[in-house]
Image (tube, rainbow, N blue to C red):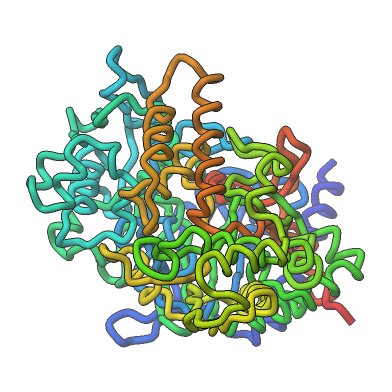
């Protein structure tokens, strides 16, 4: 027996030596470095002395004492790499500081109150449980005991209270403030500057009890808490909301901590040894390296990154993927966030205040050709309505297609009725894009070309800085006259998707009947059939009235290295779809690097 154990031990040592040599060869023999106060230092182990000794005894144990799966590489190789857009405008790791200007690897320094499973059902995260009062207005979330920040400070309901008061404060200027409009008690008045943030209906009853009060019964409230990211009250008071944008002041209650921040070059996170939440990670380090988006797939082919999301893949990339058995087997397509691409306008001013103009443009878009020849059917399906098939209350495309189907002759008739026969006298348009990658620029260019060719008008497509676009979109009155954008769900309920089209949302379009239907349906708790019917009628009005021109419903997906494993990404949901599902934040506690990582460079496409 002892001789057998000795041979196993010797074999394991030899295996580890081989892996170490491969790792050195792949990394040029360099150790990751961190920069603190301008001094570059060798990065220190995440584990404590005792944990390091344990890992030395068993190299397959994480810092939490959990054993890695049987097919996993040793813990020292549990390093995940991704590419980061060098052209992005990144300022924060925290959703509650800015939703639209995040660093790569954002939102891993805390756990929300809830998470979502693969079927988008709400599951506990930092909150063990919750309940609602009989009148449907007061929700009580019970925080899991023992949660803490990486500086040893307990994570409490007071942190959430301070966070929500921050994002409601108009001086903070949160770029997602519309999300809680009409939902949280006193939210609307606070963001308008009419009440102080302390009057917000988000209160810490005690350390482990958070109370959230809504303006009216709001059944989707727990699902909205998918975005209940939390900031540390103490750090907010001492350093301000950007405390996580500095290695020296960063503090985490999430599965990872900030180790390296070199904007424009590199970001590294390490597993948080103080983490006590629901998703202790198997990965010991995450690395994001800045690159030009048009090099992402090449970096993947070269084994330099472990995952590329579909929005960074070009039609040429998809051709390569589909022609290669290994790549195609590891491209996992899914619903994503049920995202729809569409055109939007300022309907309060000419020329788009004329519905005939909007209808003319809607019928001038050849969606079928654009999806087949530019977007790619693996990435999208033509859209004639806002809600993607499969989303709750989505209607059949055939029923709504009549309102925005491609019909050039019909489009010309509408434009003539608006006073612009054959496009004569129609003003030149500028279609704004929201810092889109090359693949999506090509899609929107094709949309503009379809409209121009049909209607004999001129459209200039202009790809704008992300912040400039969003500032114009959110301005009241709007600063965006005509643009293209995509939108995906924030929570799985029609109140979210259709809610962005009410007059208090982000679009310069208003229809009183649409608004009445959405608001009535959103508050229904006891009649799901009627609730669905009201939402469907509201969407019909949106499509017929051409609040927007709907172009494509996006399939989303990821190309993953074969050695990136975990049930969370490799096992299918109830619809038979595998992949890195949107909103499944527990994925970071499940994925790992398999022993196949030693073959990293053999997956390069020849």
Residue 371 vs residue 415: left or right?
right
Q: Nearer the viewer, residue 11 or 594?
A: 594
- Of residue 29 and residue 298, the one placed in the foreground of this image is 298
Which quarter shows the N terminus?
A: top right
Left or right: where 59 falls relative to 201: right
**Residue 307 position within the rendered picture, expressed as x and y whole percent measured from the top left:** 67, 66
The vertical placement of 249 against 42, above or below, is above
| Viewer-side residue, 406 vs 460 | 406
Question: Is any part of residue 568 visible from this angle?
Answer: yes
User: Up-down: is 505 above or below 316?
Assistant: above
Q: Along the horizontal axis of the image, is 130 left or right of 490?
A: left
Residue 296 found in image quarter: bottom right
**Residue visible at 42% across and 32% down in the picture:** 517
Residue at 57% x, 59% y is 359
For the image, the number of numbered tags is 0
Image quadrant holding the C terminus, namely bottom right
Can the viewer see residue 307? no
Q: Quadrant of residue 249?
A: bottom left
- Image location (x, y in percent) of residue 297: 71, 77
Residue 399 image offset from top left, x and y in percent: 69, 39
Q: Where is residue 199? Give x, y as percent.
A: 11, 39
Measured along the vertical axis of the image, is residue 94 above or below residue 43?
A: above
Residue 353 in the image: above or below residue 255? below
Tell me the residue at 64%/75% (across/down): 455
Residue nearest the viewer, comparing 325 with 185: 185
């Amino acid at each position: 027996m002892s001789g057998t154990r000795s041979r196993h031990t010797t074999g394991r040592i030899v295996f580890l030596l081989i892996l170490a040599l491969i790792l050195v060869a792949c990394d040029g023999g360099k150790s990751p470095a961190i920069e603190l106060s301008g001094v570059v230092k060798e990065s220190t182990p995440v584990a404590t002395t005792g944990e390091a000794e344990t890992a030395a005894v068993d190299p397959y144990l994480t810092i939490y004492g959990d054993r890695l799966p049987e097919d996993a590489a040793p813990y020292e190789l549990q390093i995940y790499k991704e590419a980061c857009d060098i052209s992005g405008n990144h300022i924060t790791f925290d959703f509650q500081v800015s939703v639209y200007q995040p660093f790569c690897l954002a939102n891993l320094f805390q756990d929300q109150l809830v998470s979502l499973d693969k079927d988008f059902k709400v599951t506990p995260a930092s909150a063990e449980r919750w309940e609602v009062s009989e009148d449907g207005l007061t929700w009580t979330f019970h925080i899991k005991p023992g949660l803490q920040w990486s500086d040893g400070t307990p994570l409490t309901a007071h942190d959430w209270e301070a966070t929500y008061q921050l994002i409601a404060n108009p001086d903070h200027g949160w770029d997602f403030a519309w999300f809680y409009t009409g939902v949280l008690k006193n939210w609307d008045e606070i963001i308008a500057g009419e009440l102080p943030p302390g009057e917000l209906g988000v209160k810490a009853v005690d350390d482990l009890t958070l109370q959230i009060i809504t303006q009216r019964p709001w059944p989707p409230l727990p699902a909205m808490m998918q975005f209940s990211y939390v900031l540390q009250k103490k750090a907010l008071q001492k350093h301000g909301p950007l405390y996580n944008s500095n290695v020296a002041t960063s503090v985490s209650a999430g599965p990872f901590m900030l180790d390296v921040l070199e904007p424009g070059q590199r970001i590294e996170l390490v597993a948080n040894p103080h983490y006590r939440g629901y998703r202790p990670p198997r990965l010991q380090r995450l690395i994001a390296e800045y690159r030009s988006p048009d090099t992402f797939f090449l970096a993947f082919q070269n084994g330099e990154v472990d995952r590329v999301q579909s929005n960074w893949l070009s039609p040429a990339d998809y051709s390569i993927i589909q022609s290669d058995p290994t790549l195609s087997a590891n491209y996992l397509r899914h619903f994503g966030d049920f995202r729809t691409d569409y055109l939007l306008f300022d309907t309060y001013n000419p020329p788009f205040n004329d519905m005939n103009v909007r209808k003319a443009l809607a019928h001038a878009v050849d969606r079928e050709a654009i999806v087949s020849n530019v977007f790619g059917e693996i990435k999208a399906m033509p859209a004639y309505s806002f809600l993607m098939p499969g989303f709750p209350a989505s209607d059949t495309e055939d029923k709504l297609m009549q309102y925005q189907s491609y019909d050039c002759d019909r489009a010309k008739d509408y434009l003539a009725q608006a006073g612009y026969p054959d496009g004569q006298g129609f003003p030149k348009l500028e279609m704004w894009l929201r810092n889109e990658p090359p693949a999506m620029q090509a899609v929107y260019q094709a949309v503009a070309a379809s409209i121009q060719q049909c209607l004999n008008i001129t459209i200039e497509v202009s790809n704008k800085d992300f912040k400039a676009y969003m500032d114009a979109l959110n301005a009241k009155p709007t600063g965006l006259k005509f643009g293209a954008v995509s939108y995906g769900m924030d929570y799985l309920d029609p109140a979210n998707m259709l809610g962005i089209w009410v007059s208090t949302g982000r679009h310069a379009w208003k229809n009183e009947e649409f608004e009445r239907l959405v608001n009535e349906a959103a508050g229904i708790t006891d009649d799901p059939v009627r609730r669905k019917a009201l939402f469907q009628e509201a969407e019909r009005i949106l499509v017929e009235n051409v609040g927007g021109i709907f172009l494509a419903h996006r399939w989303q997906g990821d190309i993953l290295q074969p050695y990136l494993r975990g049930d969370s990404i490799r096992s299918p949901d109830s619809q038979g779809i595998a992949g890195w599902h949107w909103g499944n934040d527990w994925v970071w506690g499940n994925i790992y690097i398999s022993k196949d990582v030693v073959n990293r460079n053999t997956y390069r496409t020849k």
